[in-house]
Image (cartoon, helix red, strand yellow):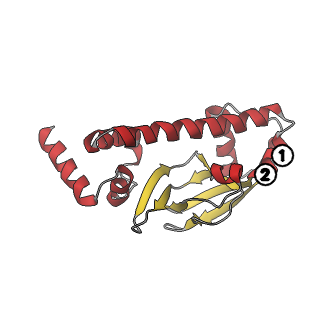
Amino acid sequence: MNQHFLKMRETLEQRFKAELSDWSRFIDFFHLQQLDEGEHWIKAGQSCEEFFYIAEGLVRIYYVDQEGNEVNEGFYEEGMLLGPISSFVSGAPCPYYIQTIEPATLLIANYPKFHAYALDKPEILNFEITFMHSLFVSNAKRDAKRLICNGEQRYRWFCKEYQHLLDRIPQYHIASFLGMTPVSLSRLKKNLNQTN
């Protein structure tokens, strides 16, 4: 079996407590896709019924504001599941962009087909609920930090939360995520280095 599928199984069983007794049927829903650095998996306005597991690489979700600026919403690495859940629920087009920061290998599945399969299988349905819950909680925690903290607090939180990714994410992407310009971020880092 492909190493990426084996790694996905390990992740789902450990992180999401998934009980995947019918593994061969489960993986039938997934197919591999390779993306180059900077390639979009989906763009805002497109319809989407798929979600994916990141086997290798790093991706970002971003919006484009009214001035045409890219605003990063989050960064997602190996072992994470991702998809435009709001589109699944509402049937509306995807409201944001998903783009690779590094070359990526994704395992992609059709959500409606997967959900239909899960409906009469409690262990798979439980995994689906756990995945949705996990995504909701992590997004809520991240959004709260970005809304109630000042620039220095946001940066300190980012360094703690994403410490293992600091060398993989370009500074201008970090600045966008933190709601500041690259110059402001550079100045903040310099000031913190002088006081520490």
Tag 2's secondary structure? helix
The x and y percentages for residue 17 are: 67, 30
Label 2 Cα crowd, 10 Å radius (few <14 / some 14-19 / many 20+): few
In screen coordinates, is 45 left or right of 146? right
Query: Which residue matches tag 1?
Result: 116
Labels in figure, total: 2
Residue sitting at 71 percent across and 56 percent down? 91
Type of amino acid under label 2? Pro
Type of amino acid under label 1? Ala
The x and y percentages for residue 125 are: 77, 36
Q: Which mark is residue 112?
A: 2
Residue sitting at 61 percent across and 66 percent down? 45
Please indicate, yes or no, whether residue 101 appears anywhere in the rendered image.
no
**Quarter of the image containing the C terminus?**
top left
Q: Are marks 1 and 2 in contact (CB under 8 Å)?
A: yes
Above or below 36: residue 151: above
Q: CA distance from mark 1 to mark 2?
A: 6 Å
